[in-house]
Amino acid sequence: MATDPLAGVDVPGLAAAFGRAVHGAGIPCSPERSVRFARALALTRPASRTQLYWTARTVFVSAHDQVESFDAVFASVFDAVVDPADHRGDQAAQPVPDVARGDQAPPPGAPPAEAPSADGAPRSSAATASAPGDRDPDAAEREVLVPVASAEEQLARKDFGELDDGELIALRRLMADLSLATPLRRTRRARRARRGDHLDVRATLRASHRTGGDPVRQVRRRRRTRHRPLVVLCDISGSMEPYSRAFLTFLHGAVGGADAEAFVFATRLTRLTRALRGRHPDVAIGRAAAAAPDWSGGTRIGEALQRFNDRHGRRGMARGAVVVIVSDGWETGDPALVRREMERLHRLAHRIVWVNPRKAGRDFQPSAGGMAAALPSCDAFVGGHNLLALAEAIDEIGARR
């Protein structure tokens, strides 16, 4: 009988610590994944290091290039919990109690080993299956449930550039569940409140006429709060073509909010706020695609930012707003123009969030001319290659400065 490698361990605390370690290694990971990992451990209760590894990998890994980093984090966290000789194959090490030497788990990522037959040859899975009459009657009660990702979870982890038409339609339904909200700000206008911060002198004097001029009832006012405006600038150049369809769906959901503006740019800047308004996403996205004449063209980030600052930003659209720029940062123009216009925009906006879907790559470095020039003026730099990464970007949009 195999022992529990997590016996005596605080599973929720361990799942939270492991999630933080995975996020620190550069793998997109939200606290919701740690909660999901703790639930998976409570459901499966892995009996070996291999089962523990695949349970964690199923929850936290969403791309092939994340496996190497995940393996390093898993070894650094869980090797202190399980038996080290369980994966080193150290013949001289003392085995875990009640665990046979032949039952030791293979290294992470290795295929499951097949039990050898009497003559030393590997035994097939069909040969190792016991006969119905020889099966333990209590085996059904000891079967371990293996967590399998649902279709929605698999779609949420899939890169936007790999989605087909059917998956893109399903992605629109999942994006409708995302809650996009900017932080609150206090306006200059006030309204009556029972516990307001300021005394409304005029209203108090009017009310005193009913009590013979004695201000028995004091009327107070409090400044109103409202969500900050949202402005989204999306790159639709040739380098962003694999992600443009998914981000147009994101723009449609953003414009559906109370106070949001949507722009796209490649060689020029196009405002799509009016085109994207509507209940039917297919119709709205079709109008938006037809309104942008430079679809899949070159990338002139600096000129697009300059046009936005001159015609919209300094006239009030960007003042106190949360500005989201979706681009890979590949600039064909002068990077100095990008730097100057980003500095202008940073002085106007409350917060600038740059979403780069290329950030999830293992060898990614923000060394592209436009990206390197814009990064100093960004308040947040996040990835957006799949739905989970986009959810983290939404968290940054709603964060305070």
Image (cartoon, rainbow, N blue to C red):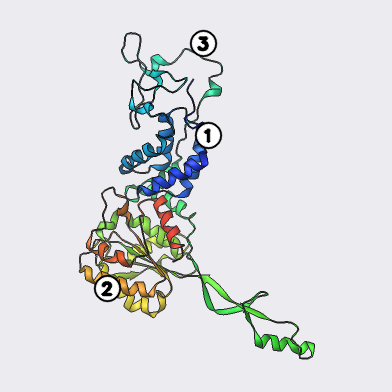
Label located before the other in sequence (3 or 2): 3
Label number found at residue 340: 2
Residue 151 screen position, x and y as percent:
44, 41
Q: Residues within 10 Å of mark 2 (few under 14, many from 20)?
A: some
* Quadrant housing residue 208: bottom right
Label number found at residue 133: 3
As drawn, is 136 to the left or to the right of 191? left
Residue 95 screen position, x and y as percent:
41, 22
Q: Secondary structure at mark 1?
A: helix
Q: Rounded to the nearest whole Å, what is the CA distance between mark 3 and mark 1?
A: 29 Å
Label located before the other in sequence (3 or 1): 1
Q: Amino acid at mark 1?
A: Leu
As drawn, is 67 to the left or to the right of 370? right
| Disc 3 + disc 1, Cβ < 8 Å | no
Observer-side mark, 3 or 2, equals: 2
Q: Is residue 282 above or below residue 35?
A: below
* Quadrant housing residue 373: bottom left
Q: Rounded to the nearest whole Å, what is the CA distance between mark 3 and mark 2?
A: 78 Å
Q: Secondary structure at mark 3?
A: helix
